[in-house]
Amino acid sequence: MALEFTVRKEIAASPDRVFSVLKDLDAASKWMPNFVGIEKLSPGKFGVGTKWRETRRMFGRDASELFEVTGLEPGRSLELYVDGTQGSSKRGYYRFRYLLEPAGGKTTLTMAAEIGGMGFILELFGKLLLGSFKKAIIADMDAMTSYIEGSKKA
């Protein structure tokens, strides 16, 4: 049983600008809360198949997860898969689907998340923890929005 939720954010920038920040792994350190580092695992341009290991400080310790781009439509959508078995959690998976829609000179960014493969006990208690996870995603989107809207490139 997978856990799912959706978060929406309006950003005062074009979909192309928002998309450029979503895919800019080097800029993550400028806006991402609790950022420790990103290790690029794929050579070349950002695209389907690009992989990286992202490390953040969580609950007083560093936690790393392996990300892979599984879908990409520039300026419109980005899909990421996180293989939890290859990261700090050692189990499960996460899917993140970002949809960017123009909205009167702004962008509506919708992020749909799916968390699964955690086993019965974690999925049972996962519903209790879902609120905390969603709050962390909202904090990420708020930080990215502040970065984009405060940037001279926006």
Image: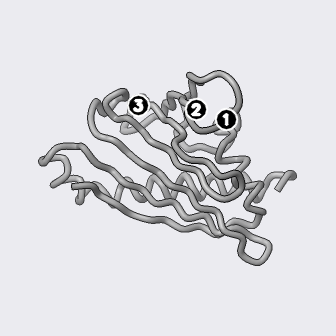
Decide which of tag 3 and tag 2 comes sooner along the chain. Answer: 2
78 to the left or right of 138: right
Position of residue 54 relative to residue 137, above or below, is: above
Contact between marks 1 and 2 (CB within 8 A): the answer is yes
Residue 124: % across, % down: 15, 55
Give percent across and percent down for residue 16: 76, 56
Q: Horizontal placement of 18 versus 64: left or right?
A: right
Kindly identify the residue that appears in the image at 80 percent across and 73 percent down. Answer: 105
> Disc 1 marks which amino acid?
Phe
Q: Which residue is mark 1?
A: 46
> Residue 63, labelled with which disc?
3
What SS does tag 2 mark?
A: loop
- Of the residues under marks 3 and 1, which one precedes in the sequence? 1
Residue 50 bears which disc, if any?
Answer: 2
The Cα atoms of the two marked residues, 1 and 2, are separated by 6 Å
- Going by the numbered disc 2, the residue's amino acid type is Thr
